[in-house]
Each structure stands twice: as C-alpha cells, then as structure tokens.
Image (cartoon, rainbow, N blue to C red):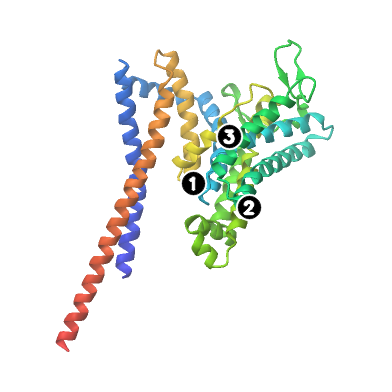
Amino acid sequence: MKKLTARIDKERLLLGIAAPLLAIVAALVITTLVILATGKDPFAAFSDMVTYGSASDSQVYILNKATTYYLAGVAVAIGFRMNLFNIGVDGQYRLAAFVAAVLGGALTAPGWLAIPLMILCAMLVGALWAAIAGILKVTRGVSEVIATIMLNSIATAIIGYLLQPEQLGQLDTAGTLVSTTPLPQSSYFFSIDNGAAGQVWGFIVIAVLVGLAYWFVLGRTRFGFDLRTVGQSETAASASGVSVKKMVATSMIISGAVAGLVGMPTLLNDSHQYDNSFPVGLGFTGIAIALLGRNNPIGIALGALLWGFLERTTNHLELQGYDKEILGVIQGAIVLCVVIAYEVVRRYGIKRQQQRVGAELAAQAAVRTEKQEVA
C-alpha cells in the first residue's frame, strides 16, 4: 500500500506540472494562429515581446503592475476557496481608495502615522462593503454574485456624487480634472529607486506580506481548515460543528479587506490622489489571475507577473504595427486554456488513481485467495 501511495504522489506531481505546460502550449498555438490570420509574423512578435519585456524599465513596470494584480488575485481567491464568487472586488477597492484618499488629504499627522491609518481605513471600507453581500447571503439567501454586482454600481454612483468640487473633490488649476485633496509628500509610500529604469513601488512589500498571511492562515490554521472544508462540502463542515453561515460572512469580510488594498499602491506610490483617471477593472483582472494561479499564493504571483508582462509587451507590439486586440486574445486564450487543461488533467488523474487502486485491491484479493487455497 505504501508503494501505491508513493506512485500516486509521483503521478500527482507529474500531472501538476503537465497542466500548466499544456495550457501554455495551447495558448501559444492559439495566439500564433490568430497573429497569422492578421497577416503578421508570430515569431517576430514573440521575439519582440521577450526582448522588450526583459528590459530593465519593463521589469520595473511589470513588478509595479503585478503588485496591484496580486492583491486583486488574492482577494478573489479567498472567496473562491469558499466557493464564493466575489465579483465586487472592483467596487470595494475603488470605494476604499476614495475614502482613504479623502482621509489622507485631510490628515495633518506625520507620514509614519498617516500611512498606516490610510491603509487600515481602506481595509475597513473594503471589508464593510463586502460584508453587505455576505450578510445578505447568510440571512436572506441572496446570491453573492448579484449582490456584489449591484454594490459595484452603487460604489460607482457614490464616488461619482462625492467626487465633485462642491462635495469632497476639487478642480485642478487647469480646470480639467476633479480630484480629492492631494496627499502631502510625507504620506507618500517609499519606493525603491532603480535609476533610469524607474522606481519599484514599495507597496510590493505589503503584497508579499499579504501573500504570506494568505498561505499561513489557509494552510496552517484551524480557521483555514474550516474555511476550506466549508468550500468543499457545507454538509460535512456543518456535521463537524463548523458554523457555515459564520464562515461565509467571515470569508466575504476578509476578501473585502484584502480588496481594499488593491488601489493603495496606485494611491500611495503613484497618483497620490483619487480622480477620474484612477484605474478601474482591477477586480475583474483579479478573477482571471486567481483562476490562472489556481488560488495558490505562488501561482497567483506568477499569474500577476505574466499579466503585467503581457500588458507591457503587447502595448509595444501595437507600436510595431500589430493589432491592439492581441492582448485580449492572448489573455483570454491563456485563462481558457488553463481552466480546460487543469480540468482535463484533474479528470485524467482521478481516472488513473481509481484504476491503480482497483488493480492493487484486485491483486491483494488474489493473494488472499491463493493463501486460503494453500491452507
């Protein structure tokens, strides 16, 4: 039986490696065919992507983008581990960043105090906004998908109303942009200077800490075990004494708290204010990255880096005469191929495991029968 277990573990490892490789190969094939259909050379495109993406300034850009994408991916993944589809990350991080920007612009405290206050404020706003969907689900059975979609729209309306000169916004000197009060320079988050290549946002440190916390809590604590159990089987979790409703609400709140951090790298390291040009859609990008990373902290990090790489290099391809829609095609192909590849490999793995266990049990039964006949 020990040999059987060892063979199963080895085969599981091989299948785990085969799935992403299969997905990458399939995505490359699809992308190649699409580029060929446009009359362009796909190999020249891939060569340009590798060359441009490996430049030092591109690496800084990719790391900065990946910091934001990683936080969005983790926020979505927390819900996925509970079988919850938190589509509301987009509204949660935008509302959180807006409130944090208003707070930061009004504070006169030194930076060492103002920065933590803004981060905590963003997490609290994100958690409270997500809690609405969680409470509606556990008390009234409202689908979190519907609730979070509606909350995204409400968050957009709230920000649009408050971000006006007569409310919490102010018009710039050129009279073209409405924003919150700019943060004082003492409230800027630190950056890592890389000379001509640019600056790596210091918020990457916070993203790493979030990833470590995600790994530890879900994989090394009783709470994480209960959360994963509820996600796999609510009936089994309830039978073991776990409060399913409490875990659903708690996971939504935690997901919202992490979502509140998504806009903070942009606010504290880049724009230093909230205006109409603040990035949108990061929550939906987080869904794709969480799927790409299979809800694993390392997988999500690789997915975020890949997303940043594709965004950087395909934008450069547009300058080389390639169609700008290539980015969407590549991203869609990768996510689709990853989902399909993992499902195909998962089903094959289950089938192989059942065959091995059946063969082993049959062999043991034959040995017992032979011994009985000899006796």
User: Distance from label 1 to label 2 (Cα)?
Assistant: 27 Å
Foreground label between 1 and 2:
2
274 relative to 5, above or below: above
Residue matched to label 3: 68
User: Distance from label 1 to label 3 (Cα)?
Assistant: 16 Å
Residue count near mark 2 (Cα–Cα under 10 Å), binned few <14, some 14–19, many ≥20: few
Name which of mark 1 and mark 3 comes first in the sequence. Answer: 3
- The reply to whether residue 113 is in sight is yes
Proximity of marks 2 and 3: CB atoms separated by less than 8 Å: no
Where is residue 224 shown, x and y percent of the image?
A: 56, 57
Q: What amino acid type is highlighted by mark number 3?
A: Thr
Foreground label between 2 and 3:
2
86 relative to 228, above or below: above
Residue 139 image label: 2
- The reply to whether residue 54 is in sight is no
Q: What amino acid type is highlighted by mark number 2?
A: Thr
Residue 260 image label: none
Taking the view exactly as shown, the residue that stands out farthest to the left is 374
